[in-house]
Structures are given as C-alpha cells and as structure tokens.
Amino acid sequence: MKRQFPIVRIAGGDSTGKQVAGLAAAASALGLGALAAWDLVQKKHSILRNYPVAGHARFMLESIRPEIQQYFIERNWDGRPFNRDTRTTIYERSKGTHSEHAFGTEHDVERPGYEALMHSNRPIANPPRPPRVRIGGEECTQPYDISLLNVSAMSFGSLSNNAVRALNKGAAMGGFAHDTGEGSISPYHREHGGDLIWELGTAYFGARTPDGAFDPEVFAEKSQDPQVKMVSLKLSQGAKPGIGGVLPGTKVTEEIAEIRGIPVGKTCISPPGHSVFSTPVELLQFIRRMRELSGGKPAGFKLCVGSRTEFLSIVKAMVETEILPDFIIVDGSEGGTGAAPLEFEDNVGLPLTQGLMIVHNALVGAGLRKKIKVGASGKIATGTDIVKRLIQGADFTNSARAMMMAVGCIQAQVCHTGKCPVGVATQNPRRVRALDVPDKSERVKNYHHAVVAEATRLMASMGASGPEELEPTMLRRNISESDSWSYARIYDWLKPGELLGNPPEEWAADWETARADSFTIPRGHSR
C-alpha cells in the first residue's frame, strides 16, 4: 500500500503570487525611474539626457557591432584585416583538416588590381623537401638555414605566456624560427627549445644598463645561447613606424621587469630612435658588433620602409665601408600585431609590396643582393602570399597574425585591452588558462607545414623548383578590366650594379642625394 503524504495548502496562494509579481514590477519601475533620473541629470552623454533609459540600447548595440559585422555582415572575401576565407583556411590547416573550396572562386577576377600567378604548361613534381634559405655572409661563422615561413616578431607581455609557449613548441616541432619581438627572451621562449631570432629594439630590453643604454656583456651572454640562431635590430615596425612605446608602471610586474631589465612598477618609455647609432655607417658598425658579440651568428635589421633616399643612404654606407648585414627584414605598413595610434596604422609607412621592391632593387643596383638575404613580414597567411613575396624580392617570409590565429586568435581586435577572449594577447590568468599549449602548438606546426607545402606546390605548378627560379613575369596584375600586365612590365627592375655606374633617371636623384654619413635629407629630395 502506497504511503500517502498530506498536501499542505497555503492560504491565499494566488494572491501571494500576485503580490510578489507586483512587488517585482514596482521594483523594476523604481529602478528604471532612478536610472531615468540619473540619465537626465548626468552631463557626460547627451544621448542619455535626451533619451533616458532607451539611450542605453544604443551603447549596448555599439558594443557588439564588431562581432555583428564580422560574423553576419561581411562577405567571405572582403573582411579586414583578414577576410573570412583566409581565417577559415588558417583554422582548417592548423587543425589538419581540408581547406579546399568547391564551385569556383568568389573573387571578381576581372577587377583592376586582381593579381594572379602564372602556371606553366610544363609543371614539375614537388621537391621531396621544402627549400630552405641559408643566411650568413662572409663575416658570419654560424650561418642559419631558415624556413620559407617563420613566426614574426611578437613579445611576451603583448602575448601571454601560453601563447609564447605554443608558438615556440610549434616552431621546435616544425623546424622553423620564432622571432622574440623586442620584449626580450622570456623563459617561455626557452621552455621548448625552438629556434629563436632575438630582436633588439630601441629600449634594448634584455640587454640594457640601468639607465637604458645597450649592455654588450649581457647581450653577448644571451645571444651566444645555442637556441638563438640570429640577432636582429629593429629600426621600425609596420604598425607604428617612427614612434616608440610606453609600458605603464602598472604592467611592469616582477616577471616583466626581470625579463626586460627594467625597474618594477615604473613606467618604461621606448624611445622612437636608437642611441647606439646616428648615421648609416654607425648603424652598420653596430650590426657588425652584434654579429661579433653573438659569436658570429647572422645579424641584420628590420624596418618599415619610408624614405627611399634614407634606405639608399644605408646602401651607400654598405658600398663605402664594405660592412654588410646578413639579412634585412622588410615590414609592411599593413602589418602589425601591436596596438598603435590610428593615424600611424592607417597613414604612415609604405605597404610591403612597395617597401620590399625598393629594398630588393636598391641592393641589386648596388651589386649587393646576392650577399644579403631579404625577409618579408606583413599579412603573410597563405601559400600564395609566400610566392608573391618571393617574386617581389624576398628570400623568406615571417608571419605574426596568421600564427596567432593558428594558436586560436579569432580577430577580436582587442589585443591592447587585456581582454583577449581566447588567451592569446592577454596577461589575465583566467583567460590565459583557456589556451592549451600541447593542442595549440600542434596546430602551429600543422599550419606551418600546410602553408609551406602549398607554396612549394604553387612554385612547382609554375615550373620552379625553388625561390631562385621565380621571375617577375610569373605574377600579373589587372591594370583594367581588359588589360593584365606582369610585374616585369609594371615596375622598373634595376640591373646588378646599375646604381654604381649610370643610375636610371627614376633613381638618379635619390642616389645622388643619399649620404653614407647622414640620414638627414635636404628638403624636397626625399622620395
């Protein structure tokens, strides 16, 4: 027999429920009334004074506008900085899944500006291994064979510890290089032993004296570590060429202070320019000193190209002193993982195509191109990007944001706020915890392998077994809807040593104005 439990009835249950609902409604009305009153008297937002309560909807919708734009409005091919097709390709390749597309291209292949690679009617088989590029000139005793694609400069502090771990472990597993960025070498760069390019900026983080000058002894000790394969001096970067940076004291933790060699809790200002040199000749002398202090490892510099005459001043200094960097990395103005003022991001510096071709042609014209390797950095994400940059004059490429996406970045574009939703560009422990190093490092390795394989396959389809066989005729751009010209026709390409004899008219004035002993250019002469 089932046991019966008494049913307890609360007198006036229906009326009690109505009373509770009435109290809730009254409380809500009171709260809205208080909010409306506050909106009417506050003086910060005109919208709220004219539209109390309702005006808050505007701010709420504005806060999620980037997400709505990215996920529901932009088309597959027109998003910025990276479109949906490119992001999807990166994610799929990092996961080891297929990245093929069906039913044809979505691009308007007849629009002006569209570029296409020229395949050959006699394509060749893929080489058994992707080509590598040897970096190291006559004064270099420890040359380095670099991959066609590497991790571009990103500092610990801008990136989380787990992001740095994942990138470096992926580099170690995939056999490519990891640029430290100017924030110095952190313990997280060393944890998995991936090849490092140590980048030194204007603040000389990790190799500085207490007053901010360059410390040669500390630099020698760290750069001679076997894990460091190359040393690089940053003159400027694509995101913010021509300015330094400020690291607020609140962000200078004990860990950051120890890694960068700065006082705990004190604001650190990176100057816009270097103190170790003031002329092109002095720049080259310091590059040579970096090479010597590192024990003979490849030494070079990175810059976003601005004035062509200024770069020619460096080239003239090379010719006159016979001091050569082992490599030059060209950063495009469209590149940049670091936060920067909008005016600098949008309006300062040359795009990678223009900057890269200036550097390449200047070195060719001075008869130095075969002695110096050139890297390209700025929106490198696919095999096509690699091959295009090789045709335009690069020997190898570096990628930052695509590598971030391989680690899990979703292009939220909040890197500078500390609120990165996936733990890549933040120091918030809770957010960083979301980034699983073993999983993400595997994705970095997979992404690198797939992209380099596609670049190699593209070159093979063009009849080239390696970068040295690529030519400007293999890349074409639509000049109009009916005309397509190759890069050999669109741009002027200098002949070896041409600047030293009879410079062409387009280059003559800049070459004549350039001075090996000064970066200062007379007004009206800089191009």
Image (tube, helix red, strand yellow):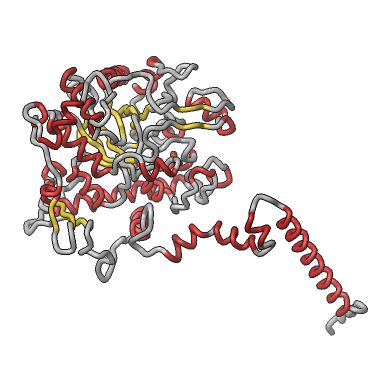
Residue 264 at what x, y percent from top left? 57, 25
113 and 27: which is toward the camera: 113
Image quadrant holding the N terminus, namely: bottom right
Q: Is residue 213 above or below residue 37?
A: above
Q: Is residue 262 above or below residue 6?
A: above
Residue depicted at 34% across the width and 47% down the height: 445
Residue depicted at 35% across the width and 44% down the height: 335
Q: Quadrant of residue 3?
A: bottom right
Counting labels gives 0
Q: Is residue 429 above or below residue 87?
A: above
167 and 340: which is toward the camera: 340
Q: Is residue 196 above or below residue 27?
A: above
Residue 84 at what x, y percent from top left? 37, 60
Taking the image as shown, residue 361 lies to the left or right of residue 331, namely left
Residue depicted at 38% across the width and 40% down the height: 239
Q: Quadrant of residue 98?
A: bottom left
- Does residue 284 appear in the picture of this structure? no
Taking the image as shown, residue 45 lies to the left or right of residue 167, namely right
Residue depicted at 26% across the width and 26% down the height: 521
